[in-house]
Image (cartoon, rainbow, N blue to C red):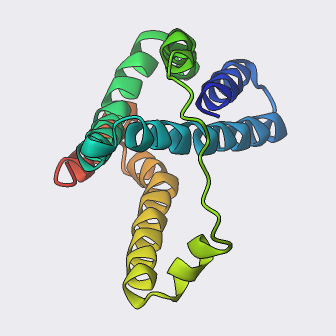
Amino acid sequence: MAVAGVLVSAAALVVMVFADHFTLWVLSRAALGFGGGLLLPGIRRAATVLDPANAGENLGRLIVGEIIGFTLGPVIAAVLVQIGGLRLPFAVTAIGLFIFVPFVARLPDDGGHRTNRVGHSFALLLVRRMQGALILVFGYCLLLGAFEAVIPLMFKDRGGGVVETGIAVTVFGLPIA
């Protein structure tokens, strides 16, 4: 699952480098999200199942890595845009993902152990604390999505460029880390 996620994400980024039409761009963006939806749970599963004694620590490290990427990504992308235009960040990220494939492919098979209990995951939705946690996560992700859609336009309207937008997103992410 993780290998497929890396390959789908990298392929979507390659298409984004060359996409000239809005529809192709949106479809590529959707494929990138689908690839991430394969990759991240696969890596989280490996972090928990392959080293159960340190599962919490491993998941924490993965989350720190995600936050660092979220925090530094906009500034790095802004610098890459200044160097080589709007397509360069997508090309660099695709190359990075292709380099990542052999490392993900070396993850050992965890055996795919499944529980015999039916519907236990959905039963968690009945737990009030889980409902509260999901509402908080949903609200937080909604906030991030709103910022991603609005901040570039707001900065452009106020005379800001790519670098200023990248710095603003990074400054927003620093307290999260």
Q: Residue at x 68, y 43 (%)?
A: 34
Q: Quadrant of residue 98?
A: top right
Q: Where is residue 51 drawn, in percent x and y?
A: 34, 37
Asked if 69 appears above or below 102 in the picture, the reply is below
In the image, farthest residue toward the front:
116
Which of the 4 image quarters holds residue 144? bottom left
Q: Left or right of 33: which side holds 159? A: left
Q: Quadrant of the N terminus?
A: top right
On the picture, is 51 further left or further right than 4?
left
In the rendered view, tell whether residue 129 sits above or below residue 121: below
Q: Compared with residue 50, is residue 11 higher up or lower down, i.e. above or below? A: above
Task: Kindly identify the residue that appears in the image at 65 percent across and 37 percent down.
Answer: 35
The x, y position of residue 117, in whole percent, is: 63, 70
Measured from the top left, where is residue 83 in percent x and y? 41, 11
Residue 102 visible in the shown view: yes
In the image, is residue 166 above or below residue 84? below
152, 42: nearer the viewer = 42
Tag count in the figure? 0
In the shown orientation, is residue 151 left or right of residue 61?
right
Front residue of this view, candidates 124 and 166 = 124
Q: Relative to the observer, which residue lies in front, 168 or 108?
A: 108
Q: Residue at x 36, y 84 (%)?
A: 129
Q: Residue furthest left?
A: 175
Where residue 20 appears, as percent x and y from the top left, is 78, 26
- Is 153 displayed left or right of 159 in the figure? right
At x 78% / y 40%, what residue is drawn? 27
Closer to the camera in the image, 48 or 62: 48
Residue 67 shows in the view: no
